[in-house]
């Protein structure tokens, strides 16, 4: 079963600033909850600018201190419009994350659409119902708060 999470947020900034921040893999740790121990393993020299085919390798500790190895590929990039990342190796059977940016009168509207699938059939669906979907939502709620702080406070 495929699960979906969609979030939308307006950032009070200009497209160049938001795109530069959101499309930099180096900012992933900044918008991920600290308790998840996000650690990029990829060569930082390859992470300065996002491009299709880019692989990003990292460790993340999402639950109970269990460190997980994750590899993401940036599959699509349309400068200042959208990019897509897909898990190539990690905890999900499928992780497909689309990031859309659009200019609106208030600033930049950012929409994320995440499609994911949990392994292990019925047990995976049960785990999703009990805690995984809440954990994914919590991660994106945290990200929302950090972006509010960075782009919308004092403006």
Image (cartoon, rainbow, N blue to C red):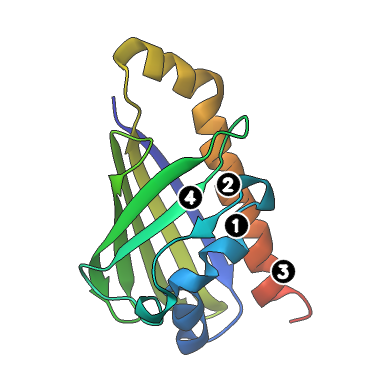
Q: Is residue 13 above or below residue 88?
A: below
Residue 127, visible in the rendered structure: yes
Which of the marked residues, 2 or 4, is nearer the chain's N terminus? 4
Q: Nearer the viewer, mark 3 or mark 4?
A: 4
Dividing the picture into quadrants, the one containing residue 94 is top left
Label 2 – label 4 distance at C-alpha: 15 Å
Determine which residue is flagged by label 1: 143
Q: Are marks 1 and 3 in contact (CB under 8 Å)?
A: no
Could you tell me which quadrant the N terminus lies in?
A: top left
Q: Is residue 73 above or below residue 155?
A: above
Which of the marked residues, 3 or 4, is nearer the chain's N terminus? 4
Image x and y of residue 78, in percent: 25, 76
Q: Are marks 3 and 2 in contact (CB under 8 Å)?
A: no
Q: Are marks 1 and 4 in contact (CB under 8 Å)?
A: no
Q: Secondary structure at mark 3?
A: helix
The disc label shown at residue 59, or none: 4
Q: Are marks 2 and 1 in contact (CB under 8 Å)?
A: yes
Determine which residue is flagged by label 2: 139
Residue under the image location 39 percent in, 72 percent down? 43
Which of the marked residues, 1 or 4, is nearer the chain's N terminus? 4
Image x and y of residue 22, in percent: 47, 72
Q: Are marks 3 and 4 in contact (CB under 8 Å)?
A: no
Could you tell me which quadrant the C terminus lies in?
A: bottom right
Front residue of 106 and 59: 59
Q: Are marks 2 and 4 in contact (CB under 8 Å)?
A: no
Q: Nearer the viewer, mark 2 or mark 4?
A: 4
Other residues around mark 1 within 10 Å, as few (<14) / some (14–19) / many (≥20): some
Q: Is residue 82 above or below residue 133?
A: below
């Amino acid at each position: 079963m495929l699960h979906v999470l969609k979030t939308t947020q307006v950032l009070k900034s200009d497209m160049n600033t938001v795109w530069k921040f959101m499309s930099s893999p180096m900012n992933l740790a900044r918008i991920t909850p600290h308790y998840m121990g996000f650690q990029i393993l990829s060569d930082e020299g390859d992470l300065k600018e996002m491009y299709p085919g880019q692989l990003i390798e990292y460790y993340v500790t999402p639950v109970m201190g269990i460190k997980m190895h994750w590899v993401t590929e940036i599959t699509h990039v349309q400068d200042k419009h959208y990019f897509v990342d897909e898990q190539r190796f990690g905890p999900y059977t499928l992780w497909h994350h689309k990031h859309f940016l659009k200019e609106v009168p208030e600033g930049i509207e950012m929409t994320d659409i995440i499609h994911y699938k949990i392994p292990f059939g019925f047990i995976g669906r049960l785990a999703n119902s009990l805690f995984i979907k809440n954990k994914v939502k919590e991660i994106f709620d945290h990200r929302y708060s950090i972006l509010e702080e960075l782009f919308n406070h004092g403006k």
